[in-house]
């Protein structure tokens, strides 16, 4: 229980001023040498011998990932990937209807998100990239056999660092009271939203999640956090600790903001236009309200038309999954379905790519 002593207002306020020095130094170099970004974007996995044309900051960055495979726990990886194999479609559903909207309710963190035009104006593509991230990191054999997931994490970490760089360098309306863009508290909260909040959403719908599964997912995301620049000493190992972290961040950050309301309205509009299942699209606000609860929904301006019951909503999600996969749901079938939908909607399968600035 000593970890609970870390979860104080003063400690978390300090986290708001902390970024990710390893990635931040690499991004300074990549901004100066955009041709290096194109090289990285061409990789299928991180090469063991990092190109000598890269300077020391970029070489140090990617050498961290090449040495990271010495630190994984094979049992943790296998348990997390087995969980996703069984519940991957529901996991992605919780990501879209609970995790991301939940992040929007945290006012200061939402200020970074709303400053990315792609999140507001190209929300479908951004959601597609997030889904690709989830599918890559939970792929069977990811990290210990399939090294593509390591490159995915390396790119996501750099994307966060690019956000810090460009907001601090060019966002004239950035208020220092928001903290450093994509700071350690916001990264902790986002990782929690992609793990513990997903589990909480499944439980809300009546799905049984036992202690072993809960701690397996928390351990998996501790590993992901380590790779993407999170200070893992603050990461919860148990459901009790996760509850306390979430409670503290809610108390500190959950409040109404124009940024959060703009983000959620863009998401709602996109869902109503793009989700092919009428049982879901006709109830978007109701579903969001069910998962988020009154406090977060009020902060985002979500007004439900009807109150939903968890068991009924669980059946709706199960029916939607059955229509998509029948009795053959697996990681492979979920990935095929995701890629098919992306090809139909965007004309391509989305990829995690570093931003390349126009040099003209």
Image: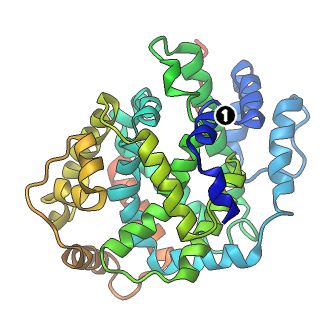
Front in this rendered view, residue 8 or 322 = 8
Front in this rendered view, residue 30 or 12 = 12
Q: Is residue 39 left or right of residue 294?
A: right
Residue at 57% of width from left, 42% of height from top? 185
Residue at 23% of width from left, 53% of height from top? 294
Front in this rendered view, residue 206 or 17 = 17
Location of residue 155 in the rendering, given as x and y in whole percent from the top left corner: 65, 44
- Vertical order, 170 against 355 (above or below): above
Residue at 42% of width from left, 47% of height from top? 250
Front in this rendered view, residue 157 or 301 = 301
Tag count: 1
Q: Is residue 321 left or right of residue 348?
A: left
Residue 351 in view: no
Location of residue 218 in the rendering, given as x and y in whole percent from the top left corner: 59, 67
Residue 245 in view: yes
Rendering quarter of residue 40? top right
- Vertical order, 179 against 228 (above or below): above
Query: Which quadrant does the C terminus fall into?
Result: top right
Residue at 48% of width from left, 68% of height from top? 335
Q: Which residue is mark 1?
A: 19
């Amino acid at each position: 229980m000593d970890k609970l002593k870390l979860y104080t207002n003063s400690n978390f306020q300090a986290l708001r001023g902390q970024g990710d020095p390893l990635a931040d130094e690499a991004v300074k170099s990549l901004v100066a040498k955009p041709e290096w970004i194109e090289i990285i974007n061409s990789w299928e996995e991180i090469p063991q011998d990092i190109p000598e044309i890269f300077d020391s900051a970029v070489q140090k960055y990617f050498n961290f990932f090449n040495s990271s495979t010495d630190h994984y726990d094979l049992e943790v990886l296998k348990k997390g990937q087995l969980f996703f194999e069984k519940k991957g479609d529901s996991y992605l559903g919780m990501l879209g209807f609970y995790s991301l909207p939940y992040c929007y309710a945290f006012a200061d963190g939402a200020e970074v998100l709303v400053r990315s035009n792609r999140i507001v104006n190209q929300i479908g593509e951004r959601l597609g990239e997030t889904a690709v991230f989830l599918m890559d990191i939970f792929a069977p054999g990811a990290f210990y056999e399939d090294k593509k997931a390591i490159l995915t994490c390396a790119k996501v970490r750099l994307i966060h660092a690019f956000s810090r760089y460009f907001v601090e360098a060019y966002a004239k309306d950035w208020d220092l009271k928001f903290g450093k863009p994509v700071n350690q508290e916001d990264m902790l909260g986002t990782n929690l939203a992609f793990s513990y909040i997903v589990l909480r959403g499944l439980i809300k719908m009546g799905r049984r999640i036992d202690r072993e599964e809960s701690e397996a997912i928390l351990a998996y995301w501790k590993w992901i956090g380590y790779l993407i620049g999170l200070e893992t000493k603050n990461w919860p190992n148990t459901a009790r600790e996760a509850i306390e972290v979430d409670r503290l961040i809610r108390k500190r950050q959950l409040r109404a903001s124009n940024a959060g309301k703009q983000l959620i309205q863009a998401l709602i509009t996109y869902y109503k236009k793009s989700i092919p299942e009428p049982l879901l699209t006709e109830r978007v606000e109701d579903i969001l309200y069910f998962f988020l609860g009154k406090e977060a929904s009020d902060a985002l301006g979500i007004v439900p038309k009807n109150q939903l019951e968890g068991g009924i909503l669980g059946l709706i999600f199960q029916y939607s999954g059955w229509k998509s996969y029948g009795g053959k749901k697996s990681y492979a079938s979920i990935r095929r379905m995701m890629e098919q939908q992306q090809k139909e909607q965007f004309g391509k399968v989305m990829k995690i790519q570093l931003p390349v600035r126009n040099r003209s």
